[in-house]
Image (cartoon, rainbow, N blue to C red):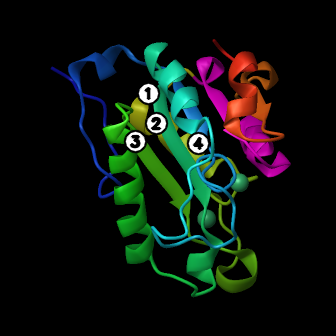
Amino acid sequence: MAFPKTTKGQGIFLKRPIDIFMKKALFIDRDGVVNVDKVHVHTIDQFEFTPGIFDLCRKYLEAEYLIIIITNQAGIAKGYYNENDFRVLMDWVIREFEIKGIKIDNVYHCPHHPEFTGPCTCRKPEPGMIIRAIGDFDLQIEECVLIGDKQSDLEAGRRAGIPPRNMLLLKGSPAESLECLPGL
Ligand SMILES: [Mg+2]
Ligand SMILES: [Zn+2]
């Protein structure tokens, strides 16, 4: 049986056979979508889930979307925290989702910042993280949905080929958008 490729070493993977048939994904930004953006959040103490994020993800899970977090983490380039800090925090975040019955399929992060590490192809608005996910999960990009809190999130989605109708710029918390989610 051919299971989809996964990205080595990132997050926690609990692949289910049903994943073979799931070819669409919800891409969500982290800071400002999953958690309240407090700038360079890197500890569990600082991590405050946004109201409605679990309900939002559950709706997409029930509609058979993979759920993938894509996040710029320039704090790593700037030396505010390191890769291990990020990994420890995200392992905890993924477990919190699991406790709520929601499987996060992968987390992609960009640890770069142009002023510290030079240009890269993954920092949003570059589409590199989404393009990697398309390959890793064999996604139909025109079926994918992206939810972000900045224009740079949507620009990354646009460059990767996600249709504009499938993208949502959050104005408040996810709870305020539950009635108008794209793709559902
Ligand atoms: Mg954000
Ligand atoms: Zn990068």
Using the image as rendered, state which of residue 83 and residue 139 is in the foreground. Answer: 83
Q: Quadrant of residue 66?
A: top left
Residue wearing tag 3: 97
Question: Closer to the camera: disc 1 or disc 3?
Answer: 3
| Mark 2 element type | helix
In reply to whether residue 150 is colored magenta, the answer given is: yes
Residue wearing tag 2: 135
Q: Amino acid at mark 3?
A: Phe
Q: Amino acid at mark 4?
A: Ile
Label 1 and label 2: CA atoms lie apart by 5 Å
Residue wearing tag 4: 130
Label 1 and label 3: CA atoms lie apart by 24 Å
Label 1 Cα neighbours within 10 Å, binned few <14 / some 14-19 / many ≥20? some
Residue 162 falls left or right of residue 103: right
In contact (CB < 8 Å): disc 2 and disc 3 = no
The quarter of the picture showing ligand 2: bottom right
Span of residues in magenta: 141-160
Label 4 Cα neighbours within 10 Å, binned few <14 / some 14-19 / many ≥20? many
In the rendering, at what x and y percent does residue 48 appear? Answer: 57, 57
Residue 160 visible somewhere in the drawing: no
Question: Closer to the camera: disc 4 or disc 3?
Answer: 3
Q: Is mark 4 within 8 Å of ligand 2?
A: no
